[in-house]
Image (cartoon, helix red, strand yellow):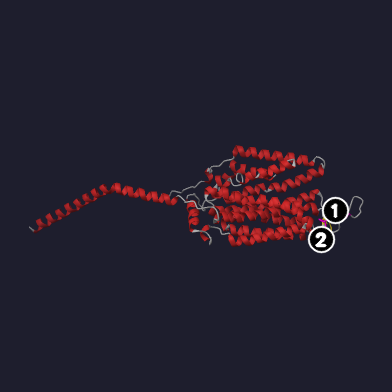
Amino acid sequence: MRQWDSHQGQQKMVETIHLERRNTMATKTELSPTARESKNAQDMQVDEVLIPRKVPSLCSARYGIALVLHFCNFTTIAQNVIMNITMVAMVNSTSPQSQFNGSSEGLPVDSFGNLNKAPESLSAKAPVYDWSPQIQGIIFGAVGYGGILTMAPSGYLAGRVGTKRVVGISLFATSFLTLCIPLAADFGIVFLIVTRIVQGLSQCSVIGGQFAIWEKWGPPHERSRLCSIALSGMLLGCFSAILIGGFISETLGWPFVFYIFGGVGCVCCLLWFIVIYDDPTSYPWISTSEKEYITSSLKQQVRSSQQPLPIKAVLRSLPIWSICLGCFSHQCYITATALLTLSCALSTLCQSGIYINVLDIAPRHSSFLMGASRGFSSMAPVIVPTVSGFLLSQDPEFGWRNVFFLLFAINLSGLIFYLIFGEADVQDWAKERKLTRL
């Protein structure tokens, strides 16, 4: 009897367990629509979190970063251009060119060897040098030698160690060397050329290293605008140097052009180290809403720092070469003064087109490729002054015509190549590669 009762108890327990399972399944079936609604609501909340809420751009930290970069580019390009303005006052074109490397501390003489009355721009405090057109072309192109070497590595280095260090140190170096140019010119042509080469290394590190900052500061749909604000400082620097440089040379002497713009660069360098941070999370003066807006915008961008740079695919990429040739041809300018002015005005469109196209086709490797394309274009400031000096020395009457025709051909070929092979979509070799482990 006891065994029979035990057997019946076990059977009732099994029936109870099955009944509870059925009730549980029925409850789950009844609640499944509610669960689905709850799940859909959660998914909608997640989507709302992923969709960044745009914050005002006025007085924002990210546009403040772009403004500081604007002033840094203003200073860098102004320091690059002022040699073109001061060369008129530095060179005594009326004296016989008896020696290429010589320098004269005296005043210019006329064609009969008599002492001319010194104009205000050629005071005793501003020495005059006897440099041939070929030597002047070498001096102009010396800055570009550094750009070929450092533009691409500076972009890669900024992506690794931070834009603040690379650009800040480079900005200080070019500003300090600008202050030293009058002294280097007094020491001789060799010292001046070496100073210009090292200055080119620093200037191109500023230009090539700054783009890495937008990988962490620039929302994808605002990068073109932020880069345009920053790069527009180059045009303002060129305009200001041309406008003010001649006036300073005439009133104070050409050395003060380097002293003033070098001092402005030191001030911008101090501002850079105080204001600039490599990412918004460590920025002390950013609002919480803007920080969340930037970080949430960047989370939607696929990026991986572990993926190596596909060198072979980059070298075979026609869109990359179209960017490089477009930048190169843009660095070369048109015949008449009116056309020159018009070309400079229209060239601002290249800042928001060719120069930041890498952010569209390869955002993962943008810091390196941006520097590489700008480094390729830096060959133009080396080649153009040297070739121009050679053409002018060979044919003083029609040399300028040949120079302008050559520059027109280069610009046209670069434009055609870019229009044919330029792209705006992310390339296959720059997309995310996910590894599946079995």
Give the SS element for disc 2: loop
What amino acid type is highlighted by mark number 1? Gln
Q: Which residues make up the magenta segment?
A: 116-123
Residue at position x 92%, y 54% in the image:
114
Give the amino acid at mark 2. Answer: Lys
Percent x, y for residue 148? 67, 50
> What SS does tag 1 mark?
loop
Q: Residues within 10 Å of mark 2 (few under 14, many from 20)?
A: few
Determine the main secondary structure of the stretch shown in magenta: loop
Quadrant assignment, res 188: bottom right
Q: Position of residue 404 (x, y in %)?
A: 74, 40
**Res. 99 mark:** 1
* x, y percent for residue 43: 38, 49
Q: Nearer the viewer, residue 305 or 62?
A: 62
Q: Give the residue at mark 2.
A: 125
- Nearer the camera: disc 2 or disc 1: 2
* Separation of marks 2 and 1 at Cα, in angstroms: 22 Å
Q: Is 282 on the left-hand or right-hand side of 257?
A: left
Nearest the eye: 253 or 183: 253
Which one is earlier in the sequence, the residue at label 2 or at label 1?
1
* Residue 392 visible: yes
- Is residue 189 at least partly visible in the picture? no
Q: Is residue 48 left or right of residue 398?
A: left
- Name the residue rendered at 10%, 57% in the picture: 5
